[in-house]
Image (cartoon, grey):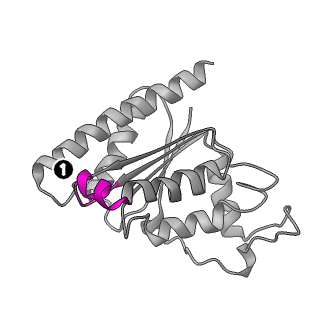
Amino acid sequence: MDSLLVFAHPRRNSLTGRIVDIFENALTASGHNVEIADLYSEGFDPRLGSADEPDWDDSKKIYSPEVQAEMARVERNEATVLVFPVFWWSMPALLKGWIDRVWNNGWAYGDAKYPHRHVWMIAIAGNEHPSYVKRGYDTAMKTQLKVGILDYCGVQEPRLEILCGSIEGQEYVDQILRDATRLGGEYKDTITNAREK
C-alpha cells in the first residue's frame, strides 16, 4: 500500500524530520511505497484565495491547479500520515493551510469524503504529557484535529498521537523516538493488514 507522509517543519533534520524517517524506513523495509510531501521545502502556499474557497452551492467546483496537483498526490496514494510539531496547541499554520486548501468541499467533505481510510496524525509536543492533561490541551487537540478534521472528513480509521516532551531533555527525546518506532511498526502492520483484506 502506498502512503503519503506529509511533513510540516521548517527543518528537515529536526526531531519531527527524524520521525518521518522512522515511518519511511518502517514502510519501505516491508515493501510499501512512500511519498513525502515536505511542505516547507516545497514552498506550499497555505493562503486560501478565492480560487480555492469552498463554494457551498457548487460541490463540483474546479479548484486551482496547485490544489488539483495536491489532490492528485493524495489520490495516487492509499493512506496518509501527517507529521508535525505542535504550535500553539495545534498544527503549524502551513499544514493547516494545506488542509484548508486541499481538503476541500466536494473532495474531502460534503458530497465526497477524504479518499483514504487510514489517516494518522503524529504531533510532537514540547511539554510533558501531565502538562497537557492538567490544562486540557490533549482533549482540545483531539477535539480539534481528530473530531473536527478527520472525523468530519469521513476518515474511517483515524488516529492522533501526541508525543510529548521534546524540549524537556534527552531522555524525553529518546522516549519520543522509541514511541515513534513503535507507531511506525503499528502503522506498517495496519496498512499491511488492510492490503491483505
Would you say residue 195 sits in the magenta stretch?
no
Mark 1 surroundings: few (<14), some (14-19) or many (≥20) residues within 10 A: some
Where residue 86 sits: x, y (%)?
36, 62
Question: What's under tag 1, amino acid-wise?
Answer: Val
Q: Is residue 35 above or below residue 189?
A: below
Residue sitting farthest toward the right: 57
Indicate the quadrant containing the C terminus: top left, top right, bottom left or bottom right: top right
Where residue 164 sits: x, y (%)?
27, 52
Where residue 145 sits: x, y (%)?
51, 56
Residue nearest the viewer, comparing 174 with 142: 142
Q: Residue at x 32, y 41 (%)?
A: 22
In the image, is 187 to the left or to the right of 79?
left
Residue sitting farthest toward the left: 170
Badge 1 marks a residue whose secondary structure is helix
Q: Which residues are magenta?
A: 124-136
Q: How many marks?
A: 1
Q: Residue at x 55, y 73 (%)?
A: 46
Residue 29 appearing in the image: yes
Residue sitting farthest toward the top: 196
Q: Residue at x 28, y 39 (%)?
A: 179
Residue under numbered circle 1: 173
In the image, is 107 to the left or to the right of 43?
right
Indicate the quadrant containing the N terminus: top left, top right, bottom left or bottom right: top right
